[in-house]
Image (cartoon, rainbow, N blue to C red):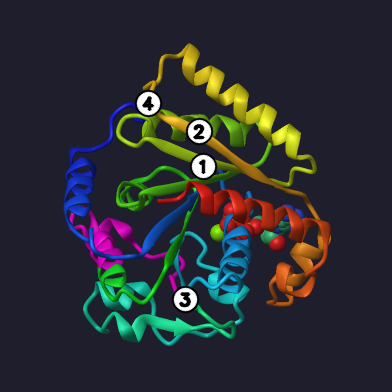
Amino acid sequence: MFNTISNQASKLLNLTKSKNNDSKTRIVTITSGKGGVGKSTFTANIAYLLSRRGFKIAVIDADIGLANMQVLFDLKPRFTLFDYIEGRNTINEIITETNYDNISLIAGKSGYQYANLKNSLVLTRVVNDLKNLNNYDIILIDTGAGLNDYVQEFLSISDNILALTTTDPSALTDVYALMKMLSINKDKLLICFNHTKNYKIGETIANSLVNLAKKNRLNKNFMVEYIGNVSSSSNISTTSRLRKLFVHEFINDDITKQFHKVIDSLLKHIK
Ligand SMILES: Nc1ncnc2c1ncn2[C@@H]1O[C@H](COP(=O)(O)OP(=O)(O)O)[C@@H](O)[C@H]1O
Ligand SMILES: [Mg+2]
């Protein structure tokens, strides 16, 4: 399954490469093989720190399993991504302003039947239309777990893919599967470790993944960039439960500093 990316995905890639060259908007897709590693929490927190650095951010909640970005931002959006896809609303109507300056949310919907949309390139259209508004510096796409067609469509249209993982062996197996798939027609994967106390541990494991890729002769031009780690803290889950952002509430915490380091590295590596 991971050895070939569908023809449709490759066509998409070419399509999006030829368009949008004049847009200043950069797209970063946050993914992981495994669910529950902290993608949505991570995405919401980096959205905030990026906005504080002066970037205009749009977050797309693309997790059809559990669309919880609206909870993290404490919002009740009127419309979702799918209202646009199904033609009920305009692109502007599905953009919900958050309570934070310079962060907009395109809300998702849990349990949406993606099978209805298959092969219609609708997700590509949403991202392109958002990009063409030229309103945003960075679009962050929070995907669900797994490497299904739906997630693959988002990956194929993204110039920048960030895998969030833990050091858990099953999460690492999934990241390697992702590397294998992306190495066919992408040039880079950014890796960040969540629930990981020490920067060096993440770096060592990222290096082992790179070595495994070499041993298995994955495409030599495919690079893996380690961009940092985020420790575990009950304050992260507590702030999320209270519908607040950790990095906003704990400005001077060591974990917020880890997030800043991740942002420094992310900004160096995205195109
Ligand atoms: N660094 C962390 N420390 C403690 N709890 C975390 C951390 N990152 C995420 N969590 C918690 O883990 C759970 C799953 O996070 P979530 O962002 O929903 O994962 P995903 O989007 O990958 O499914 C949530 O309860 C969240 O608060
Ligand atoms: Mg999530």
Give the residue displayed 31% in from the left and 74% down from the top. Answer: 134
Measured Cα–Cα span from mark 2 to mark 1: 6 Å
Between marks 1 and 3 in the image, the one whose residue lies nearer the viewer: 1
Dot 2 or dot 1: first in sequence order is 1
Q: Which region shows up in magenta?
A: 107-128
Q: Is residue 143 above or below residue 44?
A: above
Residue 96 inside the magenta-drawn segment: no
Q: Which mark is residue 105?
A: 3
Give the SS element for disc 1. strand
Residue 108 inside the magenta-drawn segment: yes
Q: Which residue, given by chain and number where applicable, does mark 2 sit on?
A: 224
Where residue 122 sits: x, y (%)?
A: 23, 63
Give the amino acid at mark 1: Leu
> Answer yes or no: do the residues labelled 2 and 1 have beta carbons within 8 Å?
yes
Q: Is residue 249 above or below residue 192?
A: below
Dot 4 or dot 3: first in sequence order is 3
Where residue 271 sits: x, y (%)?
A: 40, 51
Give the amino acid at mark 2: Val
Give the SS element for disc 3. strand
Q: Which residue, given by chain and number where applicable, does mark 1 sit on?
A: 190
Tell me, yes or no, if residue 193 can be seen here: no
